[in-house]
Structure formats: C-alpha cells, structure tokens
Amino acid sequence: MAYILRTPKLLPVPKKALWGDGFLEWEKAEFQIDGDGLACGKFVKTDYAGGFDSEEAYRLSINGEGISIEAASVAGAKAALQTLRQIGMQADSRGFRFCEIYDYPDIPVRAFALDASFGCVPTSEYLGILADRLSLFKYNMLELNVSNAYPFRGRESEWAGKGTFSEEKIAVLKRRCKLSGMELACRFDLSGGICARECAAEVVRNFEGGHFNLGDVSERLDVEAKLCAEFGSFGSPALYSAKTRLLRVPEVSDLPKWGIPVFSSGENALLVGLCESAFAEGRKFFVSAEMDAAVCPEFDLVRQKIDAACAAAKKFSAAGAIFGVPFGGGAFFPFCAAYPAIAHAAASMWGKAVPEEAVCNVLDAIVFYDSSGDFARALCALGRVDSSRFVDGMFGVSEEDVRALASSYSAADLDVIEGAADFAMGLAASSKPESRDAAVLAAEFALAGAMAKWAAVRARSDISTESDAQKTALKFIVSDFEKIWAATCEIGGLWKASSRIRSVKPEIF
C-alpha cells in the first residue's frame, strides 16, 4: 500500500518544526503518562536544562532511537507532552513521524474562563473532557466562575435546588488540572452580594491559592479594595475586571494599586491605550476576550476580539490572557460552537493566529475525530447563521410583543437566516464525529439549528393561525434542551432554565 507522507496538524503552531521522512514504529512510539502528568516509557527520555527562552520552552525529538524531551521546567515538559499527544492522535500504522520541534509560548498565562454562574453547572465528567481538551491546546489555567454556584455552609437556602460546585467536585477537577499542567482558578463576582470575609476564606481554601478573579470592580473601587486585600491576605493573587466599557477612570494610574487589572474592550484603540499605560508604569495586567451567549454564537466577531486582545498582550508584555465562554447562559447556548474559538484563542495566545481551515482540520483530527472533516466547519457555519441575535430575541419575547420585535429586526433577512441554518445543518448531517461526547455535540448542534428555523417561522407566521407543526416543533425543542442538560449538567436548575423556553407558549405545555 502506498502511503501519503502527511505532516501532523499541530495547534498551537510550534515556533520551529522540522519533519523527517522516517517513522518511529509503534513498538517504540507508544508512551504512557506517569503519576506526575509526564510522558514516560522505555523509549522516552525527559531531561531539564537551562538556556531556554521561556519557562515553558521545550525541544521534542522523535527519531529511530525513540522520543526525547528537553525542557526548561516541568511546565515545558508537559507542553511537550501535549505536542506528542497531538502527533500520536494523527499517526498511522507506520508510527510517529520523525521530527525536531522547538517551541515556547508568547503569553505566560493562557486562561480559559468558564462562566457557570447562570445555574447551569457542568457535571464532573463533562468538565473532565473539557479540561483534557484545554490542556491538549496548551492552556495553563482554567478559571471557573462559581458566583451563585458555590454551596456556602450555613447558607443552604441560597443554593438549594441549584447546580453547584461542591468541595468534592472542585477537588477532583483540581487534581485533573494539576496533572495536565493547568492551574484551577476561581472567579467569584463580589458584586453579587456574598462578600463576607468568611465566605472569601471558604472559597480560597478550596482553590488553594490560585489566581482569583473578583469580577468587575470598576464602579466600587473604594468598597472592593478592602475585599480584594482580604483575598490577598490568604495568599492568593487577585485579579479584577477593569472592563473599559464600564471604566470610570481615564488613566491606568487612577486604578487601585492592589490586584491585577484585566483589560477588555470592543474598542481596540482603548484597549491598546490601557495596555500601553500599564506597561509604562510597570503594572502587571491581563487582557481578556469573551464569547457572548447566543443560540448562534458569532465566530467571526469573537475571533476579532481574541486577536486584538492577544496582539495587545504580546506588544506590551501582559502577564496573561483570558478567553471566556458562558455555559448555558440565557435559554440555550450550544457549547460545541465554542470549540473553534477555543482552538483559535489557544493558537493566538501561544504564538500566531491560524486560518479557519487550519482550526477546523485540527479540531476534526484530535477533538471530534471526524473523518469527514465536516463537523468543525459546520460549527463555524453555525456561528454565521445570525449575527443580529434575532433568534435569541424570538425565544425571549411574549406573543403580544412578537410583531414589534420582528419589525425591529427588519434588517435581518429571514430567507438568509434559514438558508444559512440549512447549510450549517447539512454540513453537520454529513459529518461523522466519533469522540466520546459525539452524541451530545450532535444534539447541541441540531437543537441550535432547530431553534434558528423555528424563530424564522415564528417571525413570519400569523400568531392567530400558528400551525400545529410549529407548536410541535417547540415541544421537541424543549424536550431536546432538557435531554442535553441532563447529559451535561447537574440537574439542579433544569426546570428554571427549561421554563424560559416553555414561557414562549406556556399554553401548549
């Protein structure tokens, strides 16, 4: 049989990579991961040395003798392991292709922020899958927003019936993250009302001194300064979100000196100005970009946000960058649609941004295991179905106001939205993902497509003569939403979330 000499698709793209024509046969290429989260095996060698460009720098060599890793630190060795995993996932019967790779990150802290403060809390199994994929893309921090989801002792009436991040659940995830080379960090929004010192101490104890994001404090600087200092008194470096759209101070010098500001802006010039000022003053700072919760998330928009934030971070030597994604925000958010942005952000944070085609190729090869190569492209297409948020609006408006809302979206071409939804769903239908969560991924996608189609029909229909088919379609939407929730989230909060969709036409339920 004739083999094509394929080059493994790696993301992030290494700084230097030379590929040889030979292969390390599987008898020598197979490796394990030891109890410290490092590559091991009879033909695997790991050494540590100085003289590297970064603490996470590494050299990976695969040749006829075996696999050799030379790293600046354990963090570098774990980064090399993720590259080795990506190569192994794409190897064929010949084994691992010979290579010499030298790599290191541009931004020291590369965080993924999961906002689960809406009452939609992922299960430990689902979090484990996510953490594994984040580590594969060389994220080194997972930040959980546990606002309204942390079960404080003695305050059971506040969290009863909700999905929660229990101490046991946090401990399991923390061990998994540590093994993968990621810090498990916490975001706890102090503006949410629970900010007593004893509560801060309880949260800090469970996250063991990792970074803490205290939320947006730009409008309560005098009050939050004391609280931030309290977090710091437990030995935890505190971040706070100085979102420029809410910022009430003209200069970085006017920001509080405690903690680490996190700059986020839709206006690139303002973001760059803040980063430049912080750099000039020798201030440590982070940048952030966020994906909005929507039935059809705008992939193009979030990609622009990511690239702008990473460019500013690299130019002015930011300590870290955070890419944030909601989990179950609003009535429904198809988390599967976040994966193209997750991969794109990983590439931009570590080194250079890559074209959409490269992102899709990598996702299908090492995340979705889709031999057709269509599922990742379908997700990108879903992110272009509706940039107006029309679909979300149709699921949040009463029947009395639906006509007015439809009129306000007069610029939205319903034919285009339906056509884009059909195109995305057609791509998904031809895909063949085989990852362990493939059924959930497909269900999330199908639900988002069904909601887009239902919204377009609702905007066109005469409510007084709304068809039975449309009512039946809504029943299936609710049913599928509840099934996806049960497969991915803690049951607490399900009814409240489901009722948001049911309230569109409560009389049929």
Image: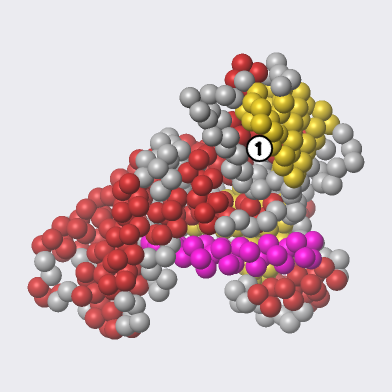
Q: What is the basis of the colouring in this image?
A: secondary structure
Q: Is residue 295 inside the magenta stretch?
A: yes
Reply above or below: 251 against 357. Answer: below
Q: Is residue 466 left or right of residue 423?
A: left
Identified at 89% across, 38% down, the residue is 50
Q: Main secondary structure of the magenta part?
A: helix
Q: Position of residue 447 (x, y in %)?
A: 31, 54
Crowding at mark 1 (Cα within 10 Å: few <14, some 14-19, many 20+): many
Reply above or below: 99 against 221. Answer: above
> Image quadrant of residue 21?
top right
Identified at 71% across, 28% down, the residue is 62
Q: Position of residue 126 (x, y in %)?
A: 47, 40
Amino acid type, callout 1: Thr
From the image, which quarter does the C terminus lie in?
bottom left
Q: Position of residue 282 (x, y in %)?
A: 86, 66
Identified at 52% across, 54% down, the residue is 357
Front-most of residues 345 and 280: 345
Reply above or below: 381 against 80. Answer: below
Q: Is residue 449 inside the magenta stretch?
A: no
> Image quadrant of residue 322?
bottom right
Front-most of residues 248 and 153: 248
Q: Which residues are magenta?
A: 290-317
Q: Secondary structure at mark 1?
A: helix
